[in-house]
Image: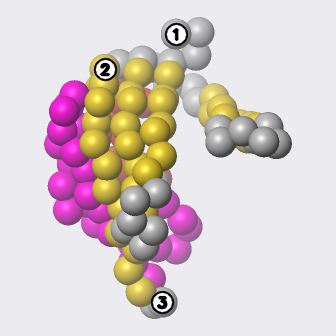
């Protein structure tokens, strides 16, 4: 897997491109299956617990990462969920009100 991160000065956007050798259906499952998402999402060395994972358009998610220093909670709303595209909000509960909009797209979609 390769990752490229681009952040243009003066803009509120960060573009993260990850190329994986998997079908859009498998990538969708990795993002929406509670048993799979805990295996890869989040910092190395932290435990992740999905508290809610309603991965459908209009659904939401809420999860917590834990380590010896404490808990870090995140939540969001799914706006679009389909193979090839996920649009969701992302909010760290430690900075309430600072909400990001994330768009995940299949390459060439």
Mark 3 or mark 2, which has the lower sequence index? 3
The residue located at (22%, 37%) in the rendering is 55
Q: Which residue is mark 3?
A: 69
Q: Residues within 10 Å of mark 1 (few under 14, many from 20)?
A: few
Q: Which residue is mark 1?
A: 109
Whether 17 is drawn above or below 52: the answer is: above
Q: Quadrant of residue 64?
A: bottom left
Residue 98: in magenta span: no
Is residue 43 found left or right of 87 in the rendered image?
A: right
Mark 2 or mark 1, which has the lower sequence index? 2
Report the Cα–Cα distance between label 2 and label 1. 12 Å
Q: Which residue is mark 2?
A: 82
The answer to whether mark 1 and mark 3 are in CB contact below 8 A is no
Q: Residues within 10 Å of mark 3 (few under 14, many from 20)?
A: few
The residue located at (30%, 62%) in the rendering is 63
What segment is highlighted magenta in the picture?
42-67
Secondary structure beneath label 2: strand
Whether residue 26 is visible here, answered yes or no, is no
Secondary structure beneath label 3: loop
* Numbered marks: total: 3
Q: Position of residue 43 (x, y in %)?
A: 54, 65
């Amino acid at each position: 897997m390769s990752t490229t991160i681009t952040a243009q000065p003066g803009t509120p956007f960060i573009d993260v491109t990850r190329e994986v050798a998997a079908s859009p259906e498998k990538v969708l499952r990795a993002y929406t299956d509670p048993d799979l998402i805990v295996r890869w999402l989040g910092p190395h060395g932290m435990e992740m617990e999905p508290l809610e994972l309603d991965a459908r358009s209009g659904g939401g998610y809420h999860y917590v990462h834990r380590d010896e220093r404490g808990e870090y909670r995140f939540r969001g709303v799914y706006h679009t969920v389909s193979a090839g595209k996920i649009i969701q909000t992302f909010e760290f509960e430690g900075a309430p009100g600072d909400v990001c909009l994330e768009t995940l797209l299949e390459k060439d979609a």
